[in-house]
Image: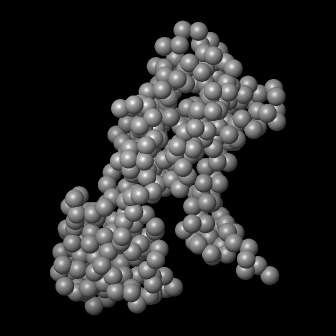
Amino acid sequence: MKFGELFSEEYLEKLGLSKKNLSGQKMVADISENDVIEMKLKVVSKKLQESRDGNKFLLLTLSDKSGEIRAIDWFNAAENDSNLKINSIVKVHGRIFMYMDKLQINIDKNRDALIVLKDDEYDPELFILTTKKDINKMWMEFNDLTDEMKNQPLKELLKIPFNDQEFIQEFIKAPAAIIVHHAYRGGLLEHTLGVMKLSKSIAELYPSADKDLLITGAAIHDVGKVYEYRIEPYGIERTTEGELIGHIVLGTKMLNDWAKKVSNLSKKDLYHLTHMILSHHGELEWGSPTVPKTLEAMILHHADDLDSKIGQINSLKEKHGKAEWSDYDRYLGRKMMLNWSNFK
């Protein structure tokens, strides 16, 4: 495969990054009270319970990429509970009711109203979000930023992964998280580019910062996420390496492996980049093995934190539509004002 073919419409479609991949199914975000539905949804949670009169019922949280909805099975609860697993994809028949001000699926009584599907019986595009930004344009911006760098050893370092077609393929489709921020295909490239652009702007505001080192650190700060997460037909999950090691340590190992191939990379820059990766979460309780102890590490941490929080806020805006306020968000630790149009 030629390098340019990585970003052809046909190739991006194979990776699920093309906007052509659209499912015809009605999405969770589009359903309304009293709808009669037949939908393919993912099982997020399940709990078999018993009513006061001794009848069992099954509470479910079901989802597609547009959102989640509660469902209840009053008729085949025990049987369906034994058949379902978390992340099972099911076809569900039922009617939409309002319960405690939220929509709920009341599953039909017939036994085939809730059935588990095989991998070839549903479209993965129902469950996997994809960046809304243009992959080609983001990749061009990424390369423009690295091309501007004056530090040749740092440029050579970045060429090792980012001229490797196989690595690029994994990088451009990788998510940046499972649920918190940029948790979709292409999210890692989108987030990385955002951090690079913020870091460059801050370095231009504070000339004592090493701009080339910052751009390099921003480009690779989350690179371990290429191997921390994987995309399955039902969504994003953490790999064994991700669970056991995590992207920060994976990223520092990758950096040191690449550095061995750059003969004139200074020991100082290697140590500094290693520190930037290790400290970019900012606090020990946020998962960093150490806290930022250089100007560049401090800038990188705040650029990373800012881009991730804006990503979270943008996701809340999409989730809540025209609502004035979001629900309480446990990651941001607050409700967010999303829409001023109703403010008087």
Q: What is the quadrant of residue 288 in the picture?
A: top right
| Quadrant of the rendering where the N terminus is positioned | top left
Q: Can residue 197 be seen in the rendering of this structure?
A: yes
Q: Quadrant of residue 117?
A: bottom left
Note whether 264 is above or below 309 in the view shown: above
Q: Position of residue 123 (x, y in %)?
A: 31, 61
Q: Is residue 178 visible?
A: no
Report the residue at 43% width, 70% height from top: 68
Q: How many marks?
A: 0
Q: Residue 106 in the image: x percent, y percent?
A: 33, 84
Q: Is residue 7 left or right of residue 320?
A: left
The colour scheme used to paint the residues is: one colour
- Compared to residue 268, the image places residue 209 above or below, namely below
Residue 21 located left or right of residue 247: left
Q: Position of residue 2 (x, y in %)?
A: 39, 31
Tell me which residue sits at (42%, 73%) in the image. 28
Q: Nearer the viewer, residue 174 or 331?
A: 174
Using the rendered view, name the quadrant where residue 213 is placed: top right
Q: Is residue 100 left or right of residue 210?
A: left
Taking depth in this image into account, of 68 and 1 the one nearest to the observer is: 1
